Amino acid sequence: MASLAVAKADDYDPASLDLAALIECRADLSAYTGYALWLAGDPGAASTLGWKEVPSGNAFLRQYLLPAPIHVFGRETATIVFTATGPMAVLDGIAAPDLARQLDVPATVSTQDKFLGEKVVAESTEDTGGVSLATRITLNVSTVDTHPGKTLAGCSYAIDVK
C-alpha cells in the first residue's frame, strides 16, 4: 500500500499546494488525497488559502474565487469548482469541444446542450491484505447548465476499495 501513503489531514502543509498540477492531472494520488483530506477536515482551510466560497448554483459543485488567477491548460482563471472526485478550472473564452481537442480528450457526450469528455491518465489496481484498491485518474472537460458559456476542465482522482 505504499503508493497510497495516505496523509492525515493535520499533517498537510498548505504551502505545498500546487493547484494547477492538481487540476491538470500532473499531481500524484498521494498529493491529492493529502490535500483533499485537509480541505474537507478543516472548516477554515479554504480561507487559509485566501479562497472565497461562492454559490455555484449546482449541488454537486463547490465553487471558489481565488485571490489571484492561476494558469491551467494555457489559460487563466480565478474560479475553480470541486466535484466529488477533484478540482476543475472554470474557463471562459474556449468551447469545451475545442479545449478537449487541444488536450486530446475524447468526447463521451457531445450535443448542442452538453459536452462531456474524459481521458484516462492513470489506472491501476493494488491488492494488499485481502483488500483491492482500484485507482483511476482522468482528465475531464465538460459543460454544465449552471455555468452557461463556461468550460470546466480538471482532474478526477477516484479510488474504489473492494
Image: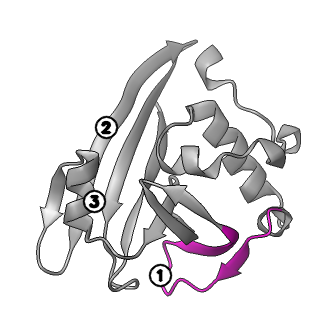
Q: Are circles 1 and 3 on residues that touch, CB within 8 Å?
A: no
Name the side, left or right, on which 23 lies relative to 15.
left
Secondary element at tag 2: strand
Q: Tell me where the magenta segment starts and ends, as one range.
A: 49-68
Give residue 76's position: percent from left, percent from top.
51, 65
Task: Answer above or below: position of 29 versus 75.
Answer: above
In the rendering, which numbered label is found on residue 31?
none
Whichever of labels 1 and 3 marks the residue nearer the N terminus, that label is 1
Query: Which residue is denoted by mark 3 in the rendering?
Result: 99
Q: How many residues crowd around disc 3 within 10 Å: few (fewer than 14), some, or many (20 or more)? A: some
Residue 31: in magenta span: no
Of the two numbered discs 1 and 3 in the rendering, the one whose residue sits closer to the viewer:
3
Secondary element at tag 3: helix
Q: How many residues crowd around disc 2 within 10 Å: few (fewer than 14), some, or many (20 or more)? A: some
Query: Which residue is denoted by mark 1 in the rendering?
Result: 58
* Residue depicted at x 69% and y 69%: 68
**Amino acid type of the residue that numbered disc 1 sits on in the rendered structure:** Asn
- Label 1 – label 3 distance at C-alpha: 22 Å
**Amino acid type of the residue that numbered disc 3 sits on in the rendered structure:** Leu
Q: How many residues crowd around disc 1 within 10 Å: few (fewer than 14), some, or many (20 or more)? A: few
Quadrant the N terminus occupies: top right
Name the side, left or right, on which 140 lies relative to 31.
left
**Between 74 and 33, the one nearer to me in the picture:** 74
- Label 2 – label 3 distance at C-alpha: 16 Å
Task: Answer above or below: position of 33 versus 62.
Answer: above
**How is colour applied across the structure in the image?**
one colour
* Residue depicted at x 32% and y 83%: 149
Query: Which residue is denoted by mark 2 in the rendering?
Result: 120
Give residue 59's position: percent from left, percent from top.
50, 79
Residue 63: in magenta span: yes
- Label 2 – label 1 distance at C-alpha: 25 Å
